[in-house]
Amino acid sequence: MSVKLSQTDEQMLNGQKGPAAQMAMRIMVRMADVVDAPEMMDVSQAHIDGCGLLSDTGLEFAETLVAKGAKVSIPTTLNMGPLDLQNWRQFGVSEDFAAKAIRQAKAYTDMGCIPTWTCAPYQSYLTPAFGRQIAWGESNAICYANSVLGARTNRYGDFIDICAAITGRVPKCGLHLKQNRKGQILLRLVDINPAVMQSNAFFAVLGHLTGSLSDDKIPVIEGLPMKASSDQLKAFCAAAASSGAIALFHAIGITPEANTLEEAFQGEQPQRTIDIHLSDLQKAASELSTAQEGINLDLVILGCPHFSFDEFRELTELIRAQTEAGQTLHPNVRFIVITSQTSYSLLQRSDFIDVLTDFGVEITLDTCMFHTPMVSKDTKVIMTNSGKCAYYAPGELAVQVAFANMAECVDSAVNGLVCQKEALWKKS
Amino acid sequence: MEKILTGKPIVAGSAQGAALVSKEPISFWGGVCPRTGEIIDRRHELSRAIVTGRVFVFPKGRGSSTSSATLMESIASGVAPAAIINLKVDPILALGSIVSDELYHKAVPIVVLKEKDFFSIKENDHLTIEPDGTVKINTDQYPCSQ
């Protein structure tokens, strides 16, 4: 062991703070050695990803910690879990799966975690401020926290996330340190029509492209519109952290460590500059779809990452327009929106919910289609506005996927056929 | 003939087995079945090979942080590799082995080698891993039991 420890670290390691803190600290210290960190440092909050996937060993790990008396020592939010805790029976989940998922949820809340159950924690509760040192899991949330909020986290995946929450300590290295946060490659948007940039699909497509261009480098993007919304940046982060391992990006004039190019690169020169044209975006967009236009549609999934109130507003307007024109949901199509309890409680204070449920939209909370078995086996073609969902669905759910903007998803759900009309999808 | 390589122990431990060598990175999540030990990434050059009991030699891990859980599950179900040798430290795989050590007192030793040494290992070489990161290659005597 070569990492320098504080007195409190030593006490945890010696078992003076109980057996759970001892196990968690032992794992943190061994990981500090793996990444060659010279010392440990404090973090002020954590977000747990390991509560999401249901596996026997993951469940045993969480229950072992609880049995040892584990409690988190810093405010800790939870990523989506393996179950819609209230409505799982509507989604065809087996009793056996549900029983284990409920045990896993209980283990994490017994440790004192806040039951947020969302993959968009930055739109929910305890959003970290600029410069705060945090320990977050969930790839899209890590990217958003580092880039858009300017909080500082490394990628804390399953197991190490809860160890950080219990000990409040992490190895001092990586993106926790300013010198490791400078931009490395420059991506310039060239001649992209402002109308294209206003499309929500644009941000997911650009994210997908950025992820695949960046390898393990930190990208800096020049040319994004100043008024990019939280939901648009969320879509970007989710796609970029799926096609690549992006934990941090900078966008000039938008993200807080990139007021200028010089600031984003911390005075250094980019290692590489890449110009992005509309044709590059069109190619990236076509990579996100495996289903052909015009094919029969089975399922629309929106809300990856979890839908916000504003996204519900946009969806409601689209559906209201269809309903007023006498259109209805096609009988062969299911329409699912996944969201958090937080967004859902705001939704219940609006009149949107009746418009959505009358149309046939099913809303599920706390989970997603990759963690809970809610997509039936006979589903062949799905449609989504999420770059992340489009990236993982063919492998994870064994379906064909069509990626499109929200309006096209609604249109297609009415027609029962995949239809993509936007300029972004036209071959160059 | 025996050749001795000096590596860095990422997760210290002793192991031996026949080398299973790949030039490609692999993601354990979606890449290795934690119940059978089969490589299930159908785009991977070692697709359908079995990692169980082998010293799995590949340059680096790739992809999802869920690979920690996959490695740990494969250790718990007894189908994990005997050891892993990489070119680049992969904290995600190290974590899976370390947590398994804490939970089940069973770890997969992981060693990182320098480029020249890494590429000197050939398929089916009989390898012995020691806790200090030493890797012994026995090229002329290959036990039938493997």
Image: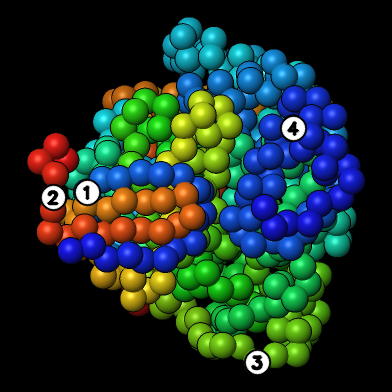
Provide the chain ID for the residue under circle 1. B
Query: What mark, if any, has residue B95 been given in the picture?
Result: none
* Discs 2 and 1 lie in a common subunit: yes
Judging from the image, what secondary structure is the residue with disc 1 in? strand
Question: Residue visible at 27% across and 39% down?
Answer: B53
N-term-proximal mark, 2 vs 1 = 1
In three-dimensional space, the C-alpha distance between marks 3 and 2, rounded to whole angstroms, equals 53 Å
In three-dimensional space, the C-alpha distance between marks 4 and 2, rounded to whole angstroms, equals 43 Å
Depth check, mark 2 against mark 1: the one in front is 2
Judging from the image, what secondary structure is the residue with disc 2 in? loop
In three-dimensional space, the C-alpha distance between marks 1 and 3, rounded to whole angstroms, equals 46 Å
- Label pair 1/3, CB-CB below 8 angstroms: no
Instruction: Answer few, some or many: residues within 10 Å of disc 1's Cα (few below 14, many 20 plus, some between 14 and 19).
Output: many
Q: Name the residue at the left extreme.
A: B144
- The residue at which mark 1 appears reads as B18
Q: Amino acid at mark 2?
A: Tyr
- The residue at which mark 4 appears reads as A22
Position of residue A313 in the picture relative to residue B127 (left or right): right
Provide the chain ID for the residue under circle 2. B
Query: What mark, if any, has residue A269 been given in the picture?
Result: 3
- The residue at which mark 2 appears reads as B142
